[in-house]
Image (cartoon, rainbow, N blue to C red):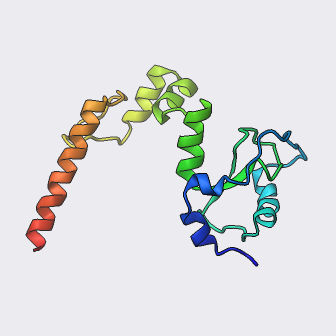
Amino acid sequence: MITDFKSYMSLPKVERQKHLDLSAACVERGGNSTNHRGLLAYYLDTVIPTGRAAVLAHACNNAKCSNPMHLYWATDRENIVEDGTEFGTWKHPWDRLVEKYGLKEARKRNSRGNKSAGGKANKGKPKSDEHRKKISEAIRRKHAERMRKKD
């Protein structure tokens, strides 16, 4: 019986990874992750997700691996940020931009049409954690004010 995919994805990541066995060797049959989606769906008795419901993630961090004991369904965030951080492959978008184009060109590309609240260009400077917290607090305050006005 095929498992309901929405209820399957509502399970915690740890539950969705119970079938993993990383002691087994990677199996590289060729192709890419999209070719292995049907294999994983068959192995886990789920449907192949459509759209962005879930992505195929490799617990072994080998993008060519097709061993279903190394694959699991994940959200974009789990696959890109959490797993990428764990394996050391995730980089902040600003760091990737600098790596690809160099600092001068990255600042130039980042300032195009990127206006801050004061109307000034960002100049490609990455924001500090303190600055991000201030922005989040300001957004929360404005949202709270709007909610009070609605009532």
| Depth check, front residue: 7 or 120 | 7
Query: Residue at left 55%, top 35%?
Result: 85
Query: Residue at left 91%, top 47%?
Result: 29
Query: In the current view of this chain or complex, which residue is farthest to the right?
Result: 29
- Quarter where residue 150 is shown: bottom left
Quadrant of the image containing the N terminus: bottom right
| Depth check, front residue: 134 or 114 | 134
Left or right relative to 66: residue 89: left
| Depth check, front residue: 135 or 61 | 61
- Quarter where residue 22 is shown: top right
Determine whether 51 is above or below 99 in the image: below
Query: Residue at left 53%, top 49%?
Result: 77
Q: Position of residue 102 (x, y in %)?
A: 52, 21
Left or right relative to 67: residue 79: left
Q: Position of residue 138 (x, y in %)?
A: 18, 47
Q: Position of residue 128 (x, y in %)?
A: 31, 28
Left or right relative to 141: residue 77: right
Left or right relative to 2: residue 97: left
Q: How many numbered marks have been drawn onto this rendered protein structure?
A: 0
Query: In the current view of this chain or complex, which residue is farthest to the bottom?
Result: 1
Query: Residue at left 14%, top 64%?
Result: 146
Quadrant of the image containing the C terminus: bottom left
Q: Position of residue 5 (x, y in %)?
A: 63, 71
